[in-house]
Amino acid sequence: MERHLNRAIIAYWRASPEADVDRALAEGDRRFVGVMGIGLIVPGIEDRDLAKDHGVKLIPYISDMIVGYRHKVFVDIAYKYAERYNAILLSRDGQ
């Protein structure tokens, strides 16, 4: 898992939520990005009905259990990515 986490940290650190939203919308994908905690969390989206209508794609390797420092770093980076992605999607999708 350590190797996967290292790759995931780098990928989400370098990722462009703006470009990812543009690509997703061009492909007809209006899903928000979510993470798993004790339950489903869709960062920046308070309206559960809106999340349900759009659908949610999950970032892997996240749960309510943090396993070590690298995992915590990944969870923090991924959560911030999801929050930014969802805000951009909302602004570009006309909701």
Image (cartoon, rainbow, N blue to C red):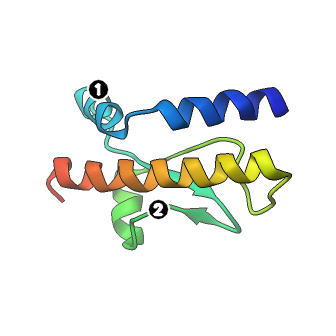
Residue 43 disc label: 2
**Outermost residue toward the left?**
94
Q: Is residue 45 above or below residue 83?
A: below
x, y percentage for residue 9?
Answer: 64, 36
Instruction: Tell me where residue 26 sits by quadrant.
Output: top left
Badge 1 crowding class, 10 Å Cα cut-off, few under 14, some 14 to 19, many 20 or more, is few
Q: Is residue 65 left or right of residue 77?
A: right
Which residue is found at the position 85% from the left and 51% from the top? Answer: 68
Percent coordinates x, y for residue 16 in the rendering = 38, 34
Q: Residue at x 42, y 51 (%)?
A: 55
Specify the quadrant of the image occupied by residue 94.
Answer: bottom left
> Which tag, 1 or 2, sits closer to the chain's start?
1
Q: Residue at x 37, y 72 (%)?
A: 47
Q: Amino acid at mark 1?
A: Glu
Q: Residue at x 61, y 55 (%)?
A: 76
* Residue 77 percent across, percent down from the top left: 57, 48
Amino acid type, mark 2: Pro
**Circle on res. 27:** 1
Q: Position of residue 2 (x, y in %)?
A: 83, 33
Of circles 1 and 2, the one toward us is 2
